[in-house]
Image (tube, coloured by chain):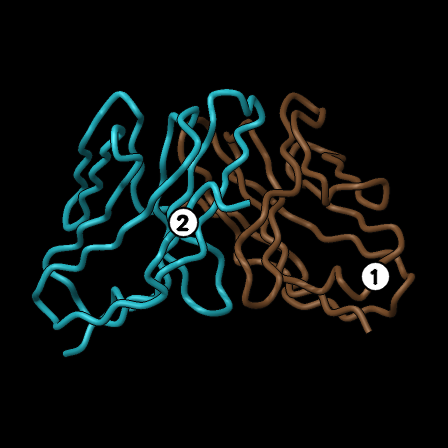
Chain colours: A brown, B cyan
């Protein structure tokens, strides 16, 4: 069964450093998303991506964040200068239409 | 942002009985609703969805009911199995969110006892 994959599973970084979280969405899907979940809180939407451009972004998704689909398979989230409050589980999701399918997540720890 | 609420943080059910998980929403522009199941250290797993033009959708042991006038949806699992023990999230999408943004509830932790 096709699935969304994410790497790495855990990323530890120092405050102020750049991180890139990687995702491989399901191959025939057209819509791509990033969400995050801070420990003990709700899953929060960050950004959606369709037709090689951002279609919607949340207030969280400020200038420190960017997304890219550099080739036909990968979808990346970059955080330019990480802050302590960026520590969270980051989930990538994709959809064709209807239900969104999530990857296993990347746990980002900012020290 | 409390547009989607799951007021019960936990639910305990006996194996073989029905589990009913509830979700309320406030935004009348939501047109599509989904239920996800999540195990610790894993991503949410899509279970079942329902469009606002329907009031019921069934898939095997899982049935979702939508009551638009009450802005309420529920997920029924019958019969419940120990493997169903997980956190269940409801999520909703608005017709105005062209990007397909989902808004999640806080989750309900279901425990199915053998």
Circle 1 sits in a helix, a strand or a loop, which is it? loop
Q: Nearer the viewer, residue A89 or B54?
A: B54
Q: Chain of mark 2?
A: B
Q: Quadrant of residue A40?
A: bottom right
Q: Which residue is mark 1?
A: A83
| Horizontal side of residue A50 vs B4, given as left or right | right
Q: Are marks 2 and 1 in contact (CB under 8 Å)?
A: no
Q: Nearer the viewer, residue B4 or A90?
A: B4
| Horizontal side of residue B31 vs A111, given as left or right | left
Q: Position of residue B45 (x, y in %)?
A: 40, 52
Q: Which residue is mark 2?
A: B5
Dot 2 crowding, Cα within 10 Å, few <14, some 14–19, many 20+: many
Q: Nearer the viewer, residue A110 or A105?
A: A110
| Horizontal side of residue A83 vs A53, given as left or right | right
Q: Chain of mark 1?
A: A
Separation of disc 2 and disc 1 at Cα? 29 Å
Which residue is rendered at x = 40% and y = 26% of the image?
B28
Which residue is rendered at x = 53% and y = 38% of the image?
A94
Q: Which mark is residue B22?
A: none
Tag count: 2
Q: Position of residue A101 (x, y in %)?
A: 46, 43
Q: Measured along the vertical axis of the image, is residue B100 above or below residue B47?
A: above
Q: Position of residue B23 (x, y in %)?
A: 32, 47
Circle 2 sits in a helix, a strand or a loop, which is it? strand
């Amino acid at each position: 069964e096709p699935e969304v994959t994410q790497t790495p599973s855990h990323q530890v970084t120092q405050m102020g450093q750049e991180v890139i979280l990687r995702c491989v969405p399901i191959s025939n899907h057209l819509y791509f998303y990033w969400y995050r979940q801070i420990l003990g809180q709700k899953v929060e939407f960050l950004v959606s991506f369709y037709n090689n451009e951002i279609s919607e972004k949340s207030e969280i998704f400020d200038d420190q964040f960017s997304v890219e689909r550099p080739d036909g398979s990968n979808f990346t989230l970059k955080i330019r200068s990480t802050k302590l409050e960026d520590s969270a589980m980051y989930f990538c999701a994709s959809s064709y239409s209807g239900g969104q399918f999530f990857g296993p997540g990347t746990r980002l720890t900012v020290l | 942002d409390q547009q989607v609420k799951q007021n019960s943080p936990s639910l305990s059910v006996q194996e073989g009985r029905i589990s009913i998980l509830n979700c309320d929403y406030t935004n009348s522009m939501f047109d599509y609703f989904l239920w996800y199941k999540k195990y610790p250290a894993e991503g949410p797993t899509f279970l079942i969805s329902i469009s606002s033009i329907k009031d019921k959708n069934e898939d095997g042991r899982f049935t979702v009911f939508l009551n638009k006038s009450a802005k309420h949806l529920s997920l029924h699992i019958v019969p419940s199995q120990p493997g169903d023990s997980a956190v269940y999230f409801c999520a909703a999408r608005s017709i105005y969110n062209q990007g397909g943004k989902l808004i999640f509830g806080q989750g309900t932790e279901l425990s199915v006892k053998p």
